[in-house]
Image (cartoon, rainbow, N blue to C red):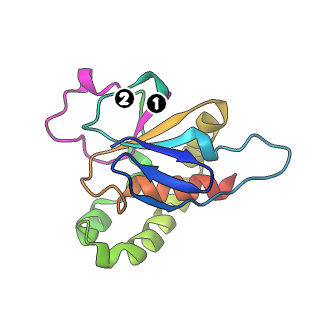
Amino acid sequence: MDVYFRAHWLTIASGTRIPENRGGVCGTRSIVTTVRLKRAYEPASPEDGTRVLVDRLWPRGIRKSDAAIDYWARELAPSTELRKWFGHDPRRWQEFRRRYGVEISRHAEELGHLHDLARRGTVTLVFGARDELHNDAVVLREVLLSRD
């Protein structure tokens, strides 16, 4: 799945369109169009820019040499307890977003580093989950955009 952003909609390669959270401050370079989402099982492409793995665990079946990961943001990944509780159950999505947001706020320095990378160029948040709409990368992107 390659996710890209246009206008006010988030469009997934499968054709699904959902409203996009568009943050931004007048007079600064917005990161809305520079933060992308992509499954770890999709091939890397030059348009990905800096590829950041945002999961605590390395994706199954992917060799590190083949993943083309530039940076592994383990500290920003959901805790093991939260990840197991969520279990990618869409019914728990809203509560997961809230709890994960609290966890992310405890890692301001790491989040700041990721935000700086996005200000310099395209960053692709790489994740292993099958569910393209309910995963940690989606929440992390929302948090990054809310800082812009």
Mark with earlier residue (1, 2): 1
Q: Position of residue 120 (x, y in %)?
A: 65, 30
Q: Check disc 1 and report its element: helix, strand or loop.
A: helix
Residue annotated with mark 2: 69
Residue at (62%, 54%) from the top-left corner? Answer: 145
The amino acid pointed to by label 2 is Ile
Pick the front one: 89 or 33: 33
Residue annotated with mark 1: 48
Q: Residues within 10 Å of mark 1 (few under 14, many from 20)?
A: many
Query: Real-space Cα distance between discs 1 and 2?
Result: 10 Å
The amino acid pointed to by label 1 is Asp
Residue at (33%, 50%) from the top-left corner? Answer: 14
Task: Check the picture and name the quadrant holding the N terminus.
Answer: top left
Using residue 63 as the reference point, say whether residue 104 is left or right of it: right
Q: Residue furthest left?
A: 61
Q: Is residue 130 above or below residue 125?
A: below
